[in-house]
Amino acid sequence: MMLFKALRKSGLARCKFPFRFTSCVANQKYDYDLVVLGGGSGGLACAKEAVEYGVRVLCFDYVKPTPVGTKWGVGGTCVNVGCIPKKLMHQACLLGEAVHEAVAYGWNVNDQNIKPDWKKLVKSVQDHIKSVNWVTRVDLRDKKVEYVNSMGYFVDAHTIEYKTKRGERMQLTAEYVVVAVGGRPRYPSIPGATEYGITSDDIFSYEKEPGRTLVVGAGYVGLECACFLKGLGYDPTVMVRSIVLRGFDRQMSELLTAMMTERGIRFLSTTIPTAVERLPDGRLLVKYHNTVTETDESDVFDTVLWAIGRKGLTEDLNLEAAGVKTKNDKIAVDQTEATNVPHIYAVGDIIYGRPELTPVAILSGRLLARRLFAGSTQLMDYTDVATTVFTPLEYACVGMSEEMAIEKLGPENIEVFHGYYKPTEFFIPQKSVRHCYLKAVAEVSGDQKILGLHYMGPVAGEVIQGFAAALKSGLTVKTLLNTVGIHPTTAEEFTRLSITKRSGRDPTPASCCS
């Protein structure tokens, strides 16, 4: 491998490992070995991994401003308008709760006058994001990944065209192309949607206080935004077209909805917006229709935030010129992330039918680079990917939902172990434990292989991460219950699951140690 890297860097070899002697020649047919379209998590991971094997890599990245003019630097959705700012806002929300709880623990805090400063919070979040943008640019330079801040698009299957900052059209060629442009939030096709509404692309840098906010959409993005807005002292309402958290375990989704309702977040069920109008005082009149009662209503809000899903950014790539096939607004790929054009690949959120999560994009990008340039045969495993919804009581899961397991194996072959629990830290401030719940979906027979784990409670993401590795390694109920928990933690509750739904017994514990 060291010899292979040396040959790559010297220009004497431009081939996959093991060597393809027919192409290991000094002349260079293409300008680059790899061109990556998109500077988000997946694209950057692929590009940075590829240069480790001595190949010539160039990465294009360009962000179209949102309808209200928001734009950002390199790093993609996660860094700029996704995971990172969302987690920081979530933390701000939790800190607000902690300040009020501190009084019960004996801290002399005058919580009557404590309130967040929205503009200061936004500035702090944006300052951090800009520092990450800068570190990313420096990292690309140090790793010798060429970076072009422009929209790259296909002229043919090996040729990419782009505009320079002076407006000149330039072209270059690549042996391999990886499309990693991700997606952007959708807007509904109703009057006033783009003129007056914002999305998650805007909220983390929004200069004015959101005030009374209508969050349209009940996926994880909508719920997370509604929850941190509520935690920061604003008044969110969530508009739900059909069900909350489609694709997740139904019982856990309903439990999360109940938790949010208990905290004062209003839900407009089976409702769709029909128009948004700006009133003379600057507020927004939203008209909406209930699809069950067939009634029309309206209400006034300060902010309308669209969270109705995301679309893949394929329209500017000119994929037709390269012969790449799409499905809806995403790119169809096989198990190797290859499109129907053998040397063109796709990773991340632009892929059809795969989990739209940053760690998924990163790992698939790295594995692809290793297969293309380092002789690896390892494929990305898209099953049993853990995820977390960052609401005040977080919900995390890995593996199958209860519904998926029943559909696949039949109800007679599924055993569900479950229980409510009481986090120790909730006792003194007398926080509600009504929705602290977890369950393990398992097979009935043998050692009872676990198919899915679901947890709702404090730091759910941290809790489920370790169990995710165990589940992928073939975790069974026997092994889980033979594991000694760390006391007193909430994670240990998984090691104490003994009550099944089938038994009909009460899953509520009498004490923290029962």
Image (cartoon, rainbow, N blue to C red):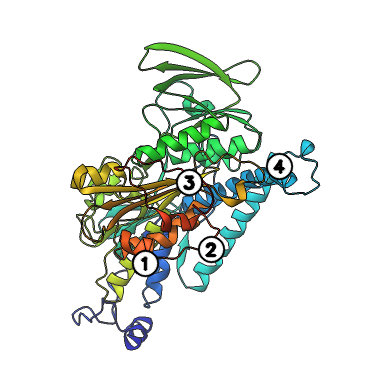
At mark 1, the secondary structure is helix
Q: CA distance from mark 1 to mark 3?
A: 45 Å
**Mark with earlier residue (4, 2):** 4
- The answer to which of 89 and 76 lies nearer the viewer is 89
Identify whether 199 is placed above or below 160.
above
Q: Image quarter for residue 386?
A: bottom left
At mark 2, the secondary structure is helix
The residue type indicated by label 4 comes to: His
- Which mark is in front, 4 or 2? 4
Q: Which mark is residue 100?
A: 4
At mark 4, the secondary structure is helix
Q: Residues within 10 Å of mark 1 (few under 14, many from 20)?
A: many
The residue type indicated by label 3 comes to: Pro
Q: CA distance from mark 4 to mark 2?
A: 37 Å
Tell me, yes or no, if residue 67 can be seen here.
no
Q: Which mark is residue 509?
A: 3
Left/right placement of residue 459 relative to residue 367 reads: right
- The answer to which of 196 and 65 lies nearer the viewer is 196
Which residue was labeled with disc 1? 366
Which residue was labeled with disc 2? 136
The residue located at (77%, 49%) in the rendering is 106
- Which mark is in front, 3 or 2? 3
Residue 170 on image: x %, y %: 40, 57
**Mark with earlier residue (1, 3):** 1
Q: CA distance from mark 1 to mark 4?
A: 44 Å
Q: Quadrant of the N terminus?
A: bottom left
Q: CA distance from mark 3 to mark 2?
A: 48 Å
**Mark with earlier residue (4, 3):** 4
